Image (cartoon, rainbow, N blue to C red):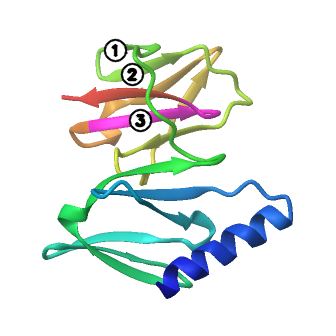
Amino acid sequence: MQHKRLLAFCALWLVAFGLRAQTLVLHHADGTTTDVELFTQPTVQFVNDKVVIASTVLSMEYPKEQVVRFTYRGSTLGVQAPKAEADYSREADRLVFHGIKATDCVAVYKPNGIRVPVRIALNGTDAVLPLSQIPQGVYLLSVNGRTSKFTKP
């Protein structure tokens, strides 16, 4: 109960100062939700049969069958939901992402949100990613909040 009061206080503080909160929302099996403000830098772990959320100001745990899903609310920075169709082409051992300007912020992420350190070469309005830089898997390319999903076989 104390963690809910703390979360409510944090949310009210942000609203009072006109900040748009970025929030991780836990959806519970009983239809309720729990908000965790992202500025607290929460970590989510699955320990045995529990979901454990810890941050700089709180620690919570729930039986895993009680947490149905996670979503985000507010203006999130970083990886956004992938677009239905990709705007890239595969050319030999590289991917070429089309319609990218030199001033765009380009990053590659794993599906869990961890940024992948890669060198992306810009060529006109294309960004070239040599596939030799990354292991097999699914990745997200984020360009100024616009995200495309791609795989390396």
Give the image quarter of residue 62: bottom left
In the displayed image of the protein, which residue is found farthest to the front? 30
Viewed as shown, does residue 83 lie left or right of 68?
right
Q: Tag 3 or tag 2, which sits nearer the N-term?
A: 2
The residue located at (38%, 28%) in the rendering is: 149
Measured as percent of width and height from the top left, residue 43 is found at 41, 71
Give the image quarter of residue 39: bottom right
Distance of mark 3 from mark 1, alpha carbons? 15 Å
Q: Crowding at label 2, few (<14), some or many (≥20) Cα neighbours within 10 Å?
A: many
Regarding mark 2 in the picture, which secondary structure is present there?
strand
Q: Is residue 109 magenta?
A: no
Mark 1 and mark 2 in contact? Answer it, CB < 8 Å: yes
Q: Is residue 140 magenta?
A: yes
Measured as percent of width and height from the top left, residue 55 is found at 49, 79
Distance of mark 1 from mark 2, alpha carbons? 5 Å
Give the labeled residue for mark 3. Answer: 140
Q: Tag 2 or tag 1, which sits nearer the N-term?
A: 1
The residue located at (69%, 31%) in the rendering is: 104
Regarding mark 1 in the picture, which secondary structure is present there?
strand
What type is the residue that disc 1 sits on?
Arg
Q: Which residues are magenta?
A: 138-146
Against 112, residue 94 (above or below) is above
Regarding mark 3 in the picture, which secondary structure is present there?
strand
Give the labeled residue for mark 2. Answer: 95
Measured as percent of width and height from the top left, residue 95 is found at 39, 21
The residue located at (47%, 57%) in the rendering is: 25
Against 65, residue 152 (above or below) is above
What type is the residue that disc 2 sits on?
Leu
Q: Main secondary structure of the magenta part?
A: strand
Circle number at residue 90: 1
